[in-house]
């Protein structure tokens, strides 16, 4: 039985991939997004054997809302590198 649905933003590599694997192994269906590394997304997809979505937030939302009644978990893993210390970042950054 499926425990629920998880969306992992930027789930194709690194921490996001590890999070996707963990939820998949725990019995959740995993949907993940990626930005520009199709090779990494395909590799993750082969490992997970679930759904991969490359899209804008709007397209991703449309897909999820049409296919899934609700998300149980959202992992917003996307990040933007900065050379500033976290306590020096503005809210926009």
Image (spheres, rainbow, N blue to C red):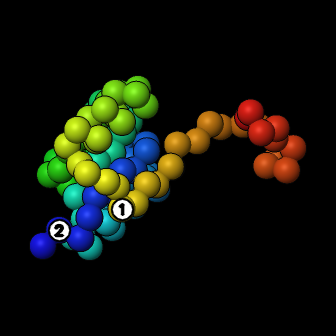
Left or right: residue 25 compared with residue 12 = left
Left or right: residue 23 compared with residue 68 = right
Front residue of this view, candidates 15 and 76: 76
Spot the residue most to the front: 69
Q: Is any part of residue 8 visible from this angle?
A: yes
- First in sequence, mark 1 or 2: give its number: 2
Within the image, what quadrant is residue 18 found in? bottom left
Give above or below for 65 relative to 47.
above
Q: Are marks 1 and 2 in contact (CB under 8 Å)?
A: no
Q: CA distance from mark 1 to mark 2?
A: 11 Å
* Structural crowding at the residue carrying mark 1, measured as other residues with C-alpha within 10 Å and reported as few (<14), some (14–19) or many (≥20): few
Element class at badge 2: loop
* Residue located beneath label 1 in the image: 72
Within the image, what quadrant is residue 56 found in? top left
Give above or below for 29 relative to 64.
below
Q: Residue at x 36, y 50 (%)?
A: 7
Picture coordinates of residue 63, whole percent (x, y):
26, 35
Front residue of this view, candidates 63 and 42: 63
Left or right: residue 13 compared with residue 1 = right
Look at the image and tell me in which quarter the N terminus lies. bottom left
Look at the image and tell me in which quarter the C terminus lies. top right
Picture coordinates of residue 36, whole percent (x, y):
40, 27
Q: Is any part of residue 13 visible from this angle?
A: no
* Structural crowding at the residue carrying mark 2, measured as other residues with C-alpha within 10 Å and reported as few (<14), some (14–19) or many (≥20): few
Residue 2, numbered label: 2
Q: Residue at x 87, y 44 (%)?
A: 88
């Amino acid at each position: 039985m499926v425990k629920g649905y998880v969306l992992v933003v930027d789930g194709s590599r690194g921490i996001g991939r590890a999070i996707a694997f963990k939820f998949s192994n725990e019995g959740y269906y995993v949907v993940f997004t990626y930005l520009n590394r199709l090779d990494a997304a395909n590799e993750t997809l082969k490992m997970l054997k679930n759904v991969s979505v490359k899209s804008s937030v709007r397209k991703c939302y449309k897909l999820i809302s049409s296919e899934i009644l609700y998300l149980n978990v959202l992992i917003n893993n996307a990040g933007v590198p900065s050379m500033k210390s976290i306590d020096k970042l503005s809210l926009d950054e």
